[in-house]
Amino acid sequence: MNMAVNTLFLIPGEVGGSETYLCETLLAMAREHPAVRLMLVTNRENDHWLRDRLGGYTQCTFHLLPIRATNRFLRISAEQIWLPWLLRKLKPDGLWSPGYTMPCWAPCRQVVTMLDMQYRTHPDDLTRLARLMTHVLVKMAARRADRILTISEFAKQEIIRYTACSPDRITVTHLGVDNAFAECADPGHKSGTTIHDPQPTTHNHQPYILAVANSYPHKNLHRLVEAFALLLDRIPHRLILVGQRRLGEPQLARALAKVPAERIERLAHLSRPALITCYQSADLFVLPSLYEGFGLPVLEAMMAGVPVVTTRAGSIPEVGGDAVVYADGREVADLADQMGAVLAWSPAERQARIAAARQHAARFTWSATAQATLNGWQQSIL
């Protein structure tokens, strides 16, 4: 099978979990399905990034369209005009567009991934123009794609609800988690090592609570900070927030202003090894999100051996099962109570819960994601 892959949406370090999804799925596909030829259509921002990760696989080829995805209008124009022209030359069996949108027409079968319907349920995460453009392109993709891939049963039901797409045209491909999150990056990391970041921030051996999320409104980080403020006199921890600044910053800034600066640390981005160490060194991981198409950080934290407090929003119960602690994300007091309760676990209870959570997380693998993706491609072509 020859499959073209539309990576024009990808700006490394900017698109959150969809970056991990694309890269890890392609790596597993290249590693475990060498008969599948992958023709990656790249942009100026991601061409070298993808070549660094996949260039060692002979079945992967790279085809640069000289545009920058930061120019949204130019990226969409290239996807609709230049990409079909390139596909005429490449002659693939199909095109996979893993970033919600795809060409209106292509000279081959088309598969599109819609990670969720967040733009419909939480429109305040996007500007008005971006929301309108996304709506038009997603509706078109839902009508014209030969198959739609999505990452949870919850997201599948959301797609059916908002696009009226037939369930028979949708394949669920749960995401995976790398075993590297369970491998001790530093034998002494539980003894209070610092976070090793390529751009070091303040080093502090104080214990901490971790959240990994860009500050979109639906990520609900302001309520996490408010809950943390209720615990300040009861715990010695800092709160570390890892993620880019997004449209939820005004609310988050108001909450942060009420917490002593020395108890908060913000990191825009961490390298993968640094992120793994950051997870493993935390006493608690919290994802207070009000909507998730999957909730990959929950899996990463469980695999890293960190207790998780999260919400029942979206797909999170599908991912976390009984291995995490749930709180009401809209109730600051409940969020604080659950965080405090987990931090008060005895060492024996903590270890038992961590072991059960890691066993649960290990069921989600990128190999399974790649196989389910391949099955979806084959269904679209046959």
Image: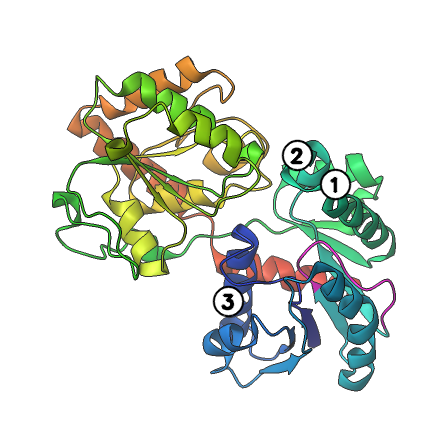
Answer left or right for 288 relative to 26: left
Mark 1 and mark 2 residues within 8 Å of each other at the beta carbon:
no
For the residue pair 138 and 111, the one nearer the viewer reads as 138
Residue drawn at 57 percent across, 39 percent down? 247
Along the horizontal axis of the image, is 160 left or right of 19? right
CA gap, disc 1 and disc 2: 8 Å
The stretch in magenta equals 97-106
Location of mark 3 (residue): 28
| In this view, 7 is above or below 117 | below
Q: In the image, is residue 208 above or below residue 190?
A: above
| Mark toward the start of the polypeptide (1 vs 3) | 3
Q: Say which quarter of the image contains residue 109.
A: bottom right
Q: Where is mark 2, residue-wise?
A: 124
Residue positioned most to the top: 333
Instruction: Name which residue type carries label 2.
Output: Asp
**Screen quadrant of the C terminus:** bottom right
Q: Where residue 143 appears, x then y in whole percent?
A: 87, 51
| Mark 1 lies on residue | 128
Q: Quadrant of residue 233?
A: top left
Q: Amino acid at mark 1?
A: Arg
